């Protein structure tokens, strides 16, 4: 009776298994930053084409999630836009290596139907929008920077991350640099208490981009790759040198150029001084254990990650509007990685 | 004639009332058709052979499919059913054979409790029991969560189905010298089979669309996976992730995946109904 | 099928039967252990949070993972409001539909319509969420919202900006999800009311509508209330569809158009990234609250339904 049922199920599963290519490849798992997700999905795909015995399963659950799952040892590596701090390192229990793997910028995307010109915002204005002090698009402070543009009387809808996000960290780091009020009232973090009254939270960079696209009057911080991929308009910001810069590979590279050496304790490149620097830029990091439990997997992990930070791996970043790591950073990342015991 | 105006008013409100009830019934039924319609219209374009058999492609590339999600769903549900059927049947047999009493009543109470627990709480349980201690996500933990979602229906139905087997049938088997075990396995259960299979189909229909427990058990994957000890792609999870993404290509695939889910669930539900009608027809004859 | 105890025990003498009995006992025991274990794990998991915050967890409204300050009030608010909207809409539509199906509809309409409404319950949650996100939310933003704001914008309930996602949209989706439950059970309860009650009312000159509203519904009110409470229980625990349309903001706001958060959505969104033990524990405590509330609601509902249907069994 149930014999026929179970036999049927078993046959189905066996047939399915036999119909597949040998899924005997080792699968490495990683989780974390959605900032990196487009880059990782392309890069790991390319890597697996070249090395069919290794696959990397990366799930974009937010930097906070990446660190949590990495600490719980549920995944082989974590990806986060802000390196683990002392407290998180202590919780991990074992020595952790942190290497920068990607460089990107958080573009300020917006949705303003009927306005064709690109909106310009000063850094202070952006901070005031997120503080909730500026609530309409035709506010005089915005109008002052956008001469000749007819701004509608639409309410500004501030979009932020609802999950623990390294992109949020980079953005709040930037806001704290430019606004003392933000620094004291809200602070910097992967997950903060957003003060703007008219705000919506969304999950992942993907969610924020999706929310902005479907909400007229919305503004939010999104990784450049998502903005370019979806042809979303992004704000031109005034940087600390007073110049107006749009978020692009060149301007983000300029921001990184001001800091040739980064370390897990000194990594911030927001509000960089250069003339062509984009103010909201940051590195993204991968965290691995210095001595992973399984040495076979450790070897494969080392191979994948050293490829990722090399020029070959970074090539995939360019086509997706990330900025390839500067040579000096590639070198220091590789030397940190060599400390891995495999 | 006294009160003709009043009578007229009552007749009018009676007609209006009747119309209101019809409207509400049509609204409720119409809602299904509207949702179904949207899913079909939006999803049918995305569903093709490539969609059903290929792996997801990375961001920025078109094409790709949900083949691994379909396979993952089948594997996870198969394992969940393999665990839920014996457990549910045994508990149902116990309840049917030992009807009254505090322990059976307690078991029935527990079964009712379980049927009301939100699936996310069950997901939390699966995480604390199977993911956290073993330190990796796995399809098996998702199967465990699904098993718990399927159990109440299986327990309740198998108890009722076994109870409804006429006493005479069971007595007859025992009179022929069969042990209780044999009598149950060879006579009582086969008689109760249609009802139990119906319950199984409905339970599978229920978990096919469950997404919440998957968030922290199956984890998801971009690759083919058949090992239940590893993370696995699941169709419902893929639909969720694609739906909240900003890529038009992925959103179209979300609709396609939704179409597959709804078709699967409808086939299972209709299948269950058909079995039920067959069974009642057989009982009548 | 209940046999006297001595006959029962007498059946299990042979070794095969004893083994069979052991397996049956074992299976049932495992079943019980799983469910009790679920409760225990939830309590154990919430212990750090219970110890750190105590009962004030329920009425504190700060949800600040950075400062490790957790209060469940905004989530409880969101859950209560969305469920309340859902129950309001679903009970009205569901009860009226049930009256139609039980009393007004000819057989050839009642059967297919009932069938369609019951199928609504089979639609997966993520499909509801998808439809809500891409169809209902824009509809609320462009049509339903402005109309409501135009008519009722003077109340704080319908004031404020309309995003499309928010409490109202989530409430409507939940209503769609629980309408089949409310309709099906109400219909059964109404159909179980004895025919003579209706006939007596009609004999006294009432119209069908008056009979339905003044005689049948009051007679069935306990069971119908039970159906609504059962629907409420479903609405409270619904996760995925709500997460996709609620707006994900742990804030209490008077406006129904505002984004919010429910107990289930915050767990779904934040669990995988909870880093500190207190954070994880706070989320599990939310799960425990959800668990306890749904048990209570479901128990109340079943008591009510049984008190009407049970006496007819």
Image: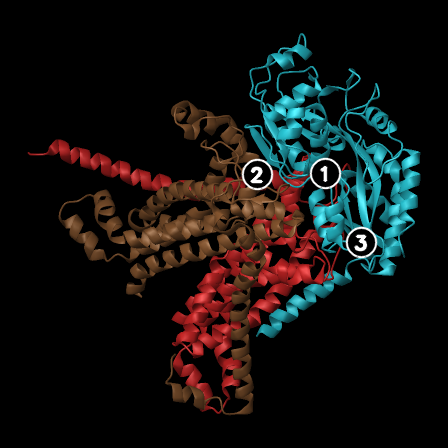
Q: Secondary structure at mark 2?
A: loop
**For mark 3, does the 10 Å Cα neighbourhood hold few (<14), some (14 to 19), or many (20 or more) residues?**
some
Residue holding disc 1: A166
Q: Residues within 10 Å of mark 2 (few under 14, many from 20)?
A: many
Q: Residue B201 sits in which quadrant? A: bottom right
Depth check, mark 3 against mark 1: the one in front is: 1
Label 1 crowd (10 A; few <14 / some 14-19 / many >=20): many
- Give residue A245's quadrant in the image: top right
**Residue beneath label 3, please?**
A28
Q: For the residue labelled by badge 3, is the local secondary structure a helix, a strand or a loop?
A: strand
State the CA–CA distance, disc 1 to disc 2: 18 Å
Sequence-first tag of 3 and 1: 3
Task: Provide the letter of the chain coloured red.
Answer: B
Q: Is residue A154 above or below residue C263?
A: above
Tags 3 and 2 both on a single chain: no
Q: Residue furthest left?
A: B1
Nearest the viewer among A221 and B187 is: A221
**Host chain of mark 3:** A
Query: Disc 3 or disc 2, which is closer to the eye?
Result: 2
Q: Provide the residue designation for mark 2.
A: C248
Look at chain C in the picture and name its colour: brown
Give the residue at x 67% y 35%.
B246
Shown in cyan, the chain is A
Identify the chain of the residue marked 1, using the numbered disc in the image: A
Residue at the far top: name it: A148
A24 relative position to B255: left or right: right
Residues under labels 3 and 1: Cα distance? 22 Å
Which residue is found at the position 23% from the left and 58% from the top?
Answer: C194
Q: Secondary structure at mark 1?
A: helix
Q: Left or right of B132: which side holds C218? A: left
Of residues B96 and A311, the one drawn nearer to the viewer in this rendering: A311
């Amino acid at each position: 009776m149930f014999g026929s049922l179970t036999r049927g199920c078993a046959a189905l599963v066996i047939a399915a298994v036999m119909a597949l290519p040998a899924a005997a490849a080792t699968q490495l798992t990683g989780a974390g930053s959605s900032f990196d997700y487009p880059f990782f999905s392309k890069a790991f795909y390319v890597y697996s084409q070249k090395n069919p015995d290794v696959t990397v399963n990366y799930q974009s659950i937010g930097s906070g999630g990446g660190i949590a799952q990495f600490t719980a040892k549920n995944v082989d590596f974590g990806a986060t836009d802000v390196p683990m701090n002392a407290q998180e390192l202590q919780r991990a229990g074992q020595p952790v290596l942190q290497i920068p793997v990607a460089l990107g910028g958080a573009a300020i995307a917006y949705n303003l139907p009927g306005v064709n010109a690109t909106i310009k915002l000063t850094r202070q204005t952006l901070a005031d929008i997120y503080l909730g002090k500026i609530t309409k698009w035709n506010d005089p402070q915005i109008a002052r920077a956008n001469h000749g543009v007819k701004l509608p009387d639409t309410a500004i809808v501030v979009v932020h991350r609802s999950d623990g996000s390294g992109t949020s960290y980079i953005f709040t780091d930037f806001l704290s640099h430019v606004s003392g009020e933000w620094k004291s009232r809200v602070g910097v973090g992967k997950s903060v208490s957003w003060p703007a009254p008219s705000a919506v939270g969304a999950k992942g960079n993907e969610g924020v981009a999706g929310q902005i696209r479907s909400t007229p009057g919305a503004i939010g911080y999104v990784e450049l790759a998502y903005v370019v991929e979806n042809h979303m308009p992004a704000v031109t910001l005034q940087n600390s040198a007073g110049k107006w810069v749009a978020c692009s590979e060149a301007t983000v590279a300029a921001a990184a150029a001001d800091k040739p050496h980064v370390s897990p304790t000194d990594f911030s490149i927001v509000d960089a001084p250069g003339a062509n620097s984009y103010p909201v830029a940051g590195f993204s990091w991968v965290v691995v254990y210095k001595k992973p439990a399984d040495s076979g997997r450790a070897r494969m992990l080392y191979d994948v990650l050293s490829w990722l930070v090399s020029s070959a791996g970074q090539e995939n970043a360019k086509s997706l509007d990330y900025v390839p790591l500067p040579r000096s950073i590639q070198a220091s990342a590789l030397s940190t990685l060599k400390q891995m015991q495999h | 004639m006294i009160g003709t105006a009043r009578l007229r008013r009552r007749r009018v409100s009676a007609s209006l009332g009747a119309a209101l009830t019809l409207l509400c019934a049509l609204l409720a039924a119409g809602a299904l058709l509207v949702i179904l319609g949207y899913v079909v219209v939006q999803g049918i374009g995305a569903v093709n052979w490539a969609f059903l058999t290929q792996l997801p492609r990375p961001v920025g590339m078109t094409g790709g499919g949900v083949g691994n999600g379909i396979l993952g769903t089948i594997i996870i549900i198969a394992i969940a059913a393999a665990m839920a059927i014996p457990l549910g049947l045994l508990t149902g047999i116990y309840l049917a054979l030992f009807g009254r009493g505090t322990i059976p009543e307690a078991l029935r109470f527990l079964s009712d409790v379980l049927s009301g627990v939100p699936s996310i709480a069950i997901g939390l349980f699966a995480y604390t029991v199977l993911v956290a201690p073993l330190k990796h996500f796995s399809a098996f933990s998702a199967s465990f969560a699904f098993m718990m979602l399927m159990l109440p229906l299986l327990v309740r139905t198998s108890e009722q189905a076994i109870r409804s087997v006429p006493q005479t049938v069971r007595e007859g088997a025992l009179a022929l010298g069969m042990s209780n075990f044999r009598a149950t396995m060879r006579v009582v259960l086969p008689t109760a089979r249609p009802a139990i299979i119906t319950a199984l189909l409905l339970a599978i229909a229920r978990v096919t669309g469950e997404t919440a427990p998957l968030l922290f058990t199956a984890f998801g994957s971009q690759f083919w996976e058949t090992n239940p000890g590893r993370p696995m792609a699941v169709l419902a999870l893929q639909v969720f992730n694609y739906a909240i993404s900003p890529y038009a290509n992925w959103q179209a695939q979300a609709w396609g995946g939704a179409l597959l889910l709804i078709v699967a669930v409808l086939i299972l539900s209709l299948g269950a109904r058909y079995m039920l009608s067959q069974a009642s027809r057989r009982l009548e004859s | 099928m209940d046999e006297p105890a001595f006959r029962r025990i007498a059946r299990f003498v042979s070794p095969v039967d004893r083994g069979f009995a052991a397996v049956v006992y074992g299976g049932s025991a495992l079943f019980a252990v799983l469910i009790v274990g679920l409760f225990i794990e939830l309590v154990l998991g919430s212990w750090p949070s219970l110890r750190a915050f105590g009962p004030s967890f329920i009425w504190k409204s700060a949800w600040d993972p950075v400062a490790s300050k957790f209060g469940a009030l905004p989530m409880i608010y969101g859950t209560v409001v969305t469920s309340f909207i859902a129950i309001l809409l679903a009970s009205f539509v569901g009860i009226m539909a049930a009256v139609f199906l039980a009393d007004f509809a000819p057989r050839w309409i009642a059967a297919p319509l009932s069938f369609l409404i019951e199928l609504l319950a089979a639609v997966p949650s993520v499909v509801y969420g998808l439809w809500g996100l891409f169809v209902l939310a824009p509809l609320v933003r462009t049509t339903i919202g402005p109309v409501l704001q135009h008519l009722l914008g003077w109340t704080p309930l319908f004031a404020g900006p309309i995003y499309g996602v928010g409490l109202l949209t989530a409430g409507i989706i939940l209503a769609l999800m629980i309408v089949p439950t409310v309709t099906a059970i109400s219909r059964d309860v109404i159909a179980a009311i004895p025919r003579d009650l209706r006939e007596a009312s009609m004999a006294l000159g009432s119209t069908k509508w008056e009979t339905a509203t003044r005689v049948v519904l009051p007679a069935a009110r306990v069971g119908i209330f039970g159906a609504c409470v059962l629907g409420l229980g479903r609405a409270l625990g619904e996760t995925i569809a709500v997460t996709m349309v609620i707006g994900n903001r742990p804030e209490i706001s008077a406006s129904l158009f505002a984004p919010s958060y429910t107990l289930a959505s915050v767990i779904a969104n934040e669990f995988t990234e909870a880093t500190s033990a207190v954070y994880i524990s706070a989320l599990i405590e939310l799960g425990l609250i959800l668990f306890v509330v749904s048990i209570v609601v479901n128990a109340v509902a079943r008591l009510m339904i049984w008190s009407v249907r049970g006496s007819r069994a």
